[in-house]
């Protein structure tokens, strides 16, 4: 008898990383269903996923924190083998302005999802964590054993708490195997040009801000401080192509399937520190577009530099980033051009 495919519930599947991960999971031979309330995405994502993969991925529209919705999904789907939990709000400045919304959404959704694990015999769980858990550290690069400093924002705190909750659950439910993936700075878009980053509000991440400045949607990239103790005075981060991050999820899921019990954390970055100005230059080089830049004051909560040591993911998951930052910025620009050509609504000038 032919073995049935493993089915993965992806929460936040319409989002930036979730959508790229769905493509990788389908490619790796998994069945996928999604839950997304479109609070930071649109249903078009699933049309685009179908264009790339030929597969219609069912999405249940609603809040993952809602137990009634989860009951309905588990009943309708009959079986689910594992969960990849992306659904969360992700803007650091927004979380500083409205911490309650962030704790409610990010912790509430994790608690709801994880409470279904035992009841429905889920044995694999992958959690979207973040480099934000490291807080303001000084010893670089950071590896998974680097002690965590206090998180610089409520957003970072939701990720630290998420990891703590899952460590406790793993101890109490040893048959549940957990991978917590600490992403550094995802950038870029799918090589098809059909999927990419599309934040609904004002973007807080550097790559979409560069795209907006290059395309005239905003006047310039405001660089927050050029007097840090770094090569050119601007902050250093570790940028990694979103498709590399996405592929790591398929590998992490495969890894969990082979374990008897485990709760492991993995860094996902390029291992290379890149300054804000260097990322802008990489974009300018591949697109031959000059990006207007203004230098502003330092922003509260920003650390000078952070980049990853990813040897653990390489060793245990067999994962290696494949794309350079130039390729990532080129793909992000191509995604933007495709959106413009399809007359996607532009945001007003900021
Ligand atoms: P995204 O906003 O593009 O995707 C998140 C998706 O989850 C969105 O489609 C949103 O509509 C949905 N969502 C949010 N809360 C929900 C809820 N309660 N119920 C149902 N759907 C909900 O963000 P992303 O960049 O794809 O990030 C995915 C995950 O990775 C998040 O957990 C984020 O914190 C984490 N992460 C992102 C970054 C980054 O820079 N993009 C870095 C580190 C970690």
Image (spheres, grey):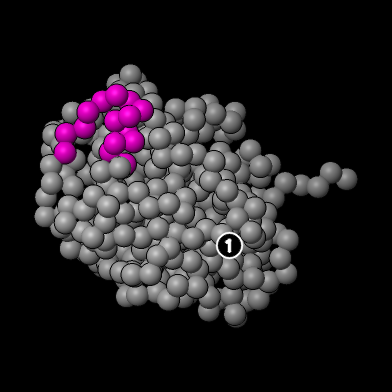
Q: State which quarter of the image contains the N terminus.
A: top right
Q: At which x and y percent is residue 136?
A: 30, 69
Q: At which x and y percent is residue 142?
A: 44, 65
Q: Secondary structure at mark 1?
A: helix
Question: 238 or 255, which is in the foreground?
Answer: 238
State whether residue 146 is above or below residue 273.
below
Magenta stretch encompasses residue 291: yes
Question: 256 or 4, which is in the foreground?
Answer: 256
Residue at 64%, 70% in the rendered image: 262
State whether residue 76 is above or below residue 308.
above
Residue at 44%, 47% in the rendered image: 240
Prevalent SS, magenta region = helix
Question: 284 or 346, which is in the foreground?
Answer: 284
Q: Is residue 239 visible?
A: yes
Magenta stretch encompasses residue 321: no
Q: Which residues are magenta?
A: 279-293
In the image, is 91 to the left or to the right of 258? left
State whether residue 121 is above or below residue 41.
below
Residue receiving disc 1: 312
In the image, is 332 to the left or to the right of 250? left
Residue at 76%, 47% in the rendered image: 4
Q: At which x and y percent is residue 346?
A: 23, 29
């Amino acid at each position: 008898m032919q073995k049935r495919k493993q089915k993965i519930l992806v929460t936040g599947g319409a989002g930036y990383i979730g959508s790229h991960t769905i493509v990788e999971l389908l490619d790796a031979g998994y069945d996928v269903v999604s839950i997304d309330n479109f609070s930071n995405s649109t249903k078009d994502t699933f049309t685009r996923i179908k264009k790339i993969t030929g597969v219609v991925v069912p999405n249940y529209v609603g809040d993952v924190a809602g137990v009634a919705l989860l009951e309905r999904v588990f009943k309708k789907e009959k079986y689910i083998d594992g969960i990849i939990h992306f659904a969360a709000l992700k803007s650091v400045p927004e979380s500083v302005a409205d911490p309650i919304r962030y704790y409610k959404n990010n912790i509430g959704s994790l608690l709801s999802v994880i409470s279904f694990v035992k009841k429905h015999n889920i044995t694999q769980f992958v959690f979207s964590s973040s480099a934000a858990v490291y807080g303001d550290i000084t010893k670089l690069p950071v590896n998974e054993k680097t002690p965590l400093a206090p998180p610089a924002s409520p957003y970072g705190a939701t990720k630290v708490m998420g990891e703590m909750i899952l460590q406790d659950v793993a101890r109490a439910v040893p048959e549940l195997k957990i991978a917590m993936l600490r992403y550094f700075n995802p950038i870029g878009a799918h090589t098809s040009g059909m999927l990419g980053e599309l934040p609904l509000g004002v973007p807080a991440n550097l790559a979409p801000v560069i795209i907006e400045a290059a395309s005239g949607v905003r006047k310039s990239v405001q660089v927050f401080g050029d007097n840090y103790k770094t090569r050119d005075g601007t902050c250093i981060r570790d940028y990694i192509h979103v498709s590399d991050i996405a592929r790591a999820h398929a590998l992490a899921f495969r890894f969990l399937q082979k374990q008897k019990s485990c709760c492991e954390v993995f860094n996902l970055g390029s291992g290379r520190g890149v300054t804000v100005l260097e990322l802008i230059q990489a974009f300018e080089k591949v697109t031959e577009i000059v990006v207007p830049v203004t230098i502003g004051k330092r922003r509260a909560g920003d650390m000078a530099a952070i980049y990853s040591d990813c040897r653990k993911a390489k060793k245990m998951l067999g994962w290696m980033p494949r794309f350079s930052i130039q390729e990532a910025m080129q793909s992000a620009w191509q995604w933007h051009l495709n959106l413009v050509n399809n007359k996607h609504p532009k945001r007003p000038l900021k």
